[in-house]
Image (spheres, rainbow, N blue to C red):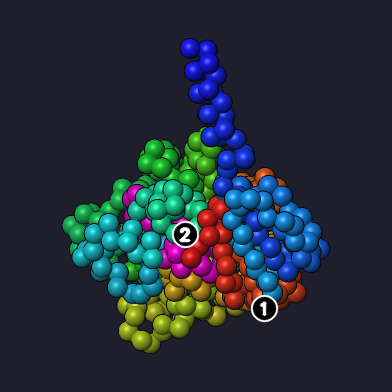
Amino acid sequence: MRKLIAGLTASLLAAISPLAAETTIIHADGLVVDAASKPMGKATVTVKDGVIVSVEEGWTGVPDGANMVHLQGRTLAPGLIDLHTHLTGDPGGDFWKATTEPTEWDVVIGAKNARLTAKAGFTTVREAGSAQHTAFSLRRATAEGLVAGPRIVAAGPSLAIVGGHGDTNGFLPEVNALLDDGYNCTGAVECAEKVRLASQNGADIIKITATGGVLSQQGRGLEAHFTDAEMKSIVDTARSLGLKVMAHAHGARGIEAAARAGVTSIEHGTYIDEAAAKAMRDNGTVLVPTLMAFQGIRGNLGKGVYTPVVEDKVRAVAAYAESIVERARKWGVTIAFGTDAGVFEHGDNAKELGLMRAGGMSDREVLASATTGAARVLGMENQIGRIAPGYSADIIAVPGNPLEDVTLVEQTDWVMVRGRIIE
């Protein structure tokens, strides 16, 4: 019996031993550990079971049984992080489709877009609002390798005021009620309840629409929607559950109020001014400018894509979009990478990098905003954003040094997410 137990124990240990782990050896002509480091020349990265175990200069030998990837003429860089995507939706102004398409269809669309996003070099995304459970299902599918795509940090339905951006509107009242996901709130107590509901249903982060928005059918202004007490209740409740809060916000006073309440990030930040920037600095709030979203909606003007009320709002914000990064930098606000993909075509996320550079950021700053900086926003700075031992094997290959020209990332032609190569 002892021999049998000993034999079984030895077999079990062999099964979980690092020697039995799946190993991939990656050779490349260059390597960028992170945006703050000096680039390396020829390098070898060893990956076991989805984790980077070593990074060495030169091309080392390949152990028996290991998988080999040889990327001659390519530079390895950390997989990028997009802090604002909507994988389960595609661009367009057909808001009425919510009445004709089941939410299950969103998961199908999401599977398509997850692959496009990963192929573009984005190995982690923050899903910034979706129908109930659609992004959560997609999150599980990419984690388990059933669907090719990035790691997903998902919010689920946004919290909104009744009748505000994020609430279902534009239909008859009885239709609005049928489509409502149940996350609108009035008053601090009810808003706390909705945060707890979101947590119960699987949210990784709480998304609120702190001001009016551009693509919703209500035509009211873009200033603060929630009261100070409501936003403070949301943030405090989220923190008690170990969750952060991201806030869609356009108007300056709405940005200021959300930052004062303690949100982690402001999304868009269109009308940011000096007072709003001070509130962000004082509270450690990061700006996610989503410049590609503004470019995408501006390109659809006059084409019958949007309703007249939306077209008016697009024209109002377009004049401010190009200076968001410049204004934020002038006032010392920390900027992190996010695109609002879904408002424009998925897979074009990397074009945001060039727009951020045009706003005055250096190539290194832009790359950092999409790697180490974005990882800090997620609280995952010890897991993603660098090519280093112990980090998730989220790696891309580009034809040159992105620290000298960050737009080379648009030419990403090899991607690994959690140790899995995206074909």
Which residue lies most toward the right here? 38
Front: mark 2 or 1: 2
Residue 231 placed where, x, y %? Answer: 49, 47
* Mark 1 neighbour density, 10 Å: few (under 14) some (14–19) many (20 or more): some
The residue under the point 27% across, 57% down is 104
Seen from the viewer's position, the closer of residues 145 and 4 is 4
Q: Indicate whether 28 appears above or below 192.
A: below
Q: Along the polypeptide, which appears first: circle 2 or circle 1?
A: 2
Q: Residue 379: in sight, yes or no?
A: yes
Residue 282 placed where, x, y %? Answer: 69, 51
Magenta stretch containing residue 117, yes or no?
yes
Specify the amino acid type for callout 1: Ala
Is the C-beta separation of discs 2 and 1 under 8 Å? no
* Distance in Å between CA atoms under marks 2 and 1: 29 Å
Magenta stretch containing residue 103, yes or no?
no
Which residue lies most toward the top here? 1
Magenta-highlighted residues: 113-133
Which residue lies most toward the left here? 174
Q: Residue 226: in sight, yes or no?
A: no
Label ID, residue 387: none
Residue 32 placed where, x, y %? Answer: 73, 63
Which residue lies most toward the bottom here? 302
Instruction: Count the numbered circles shown.
Output: 2
Residue 272 placed where, x, y %? Answer: 60, 66
The residue under the point 41% across, 42% down is 202
* Residue tagged 2: 149
The residue under the point 47% across, 81% down is 298
* Mark 2 neighbour density, 10 Å: few (under 14) some (14–19) many (20 or more): many
Specify the amino acid type for callout 2: Gly
Q: Indicate whether 127 appears above or below 305.
A: above
* Residue tagged 1: 358
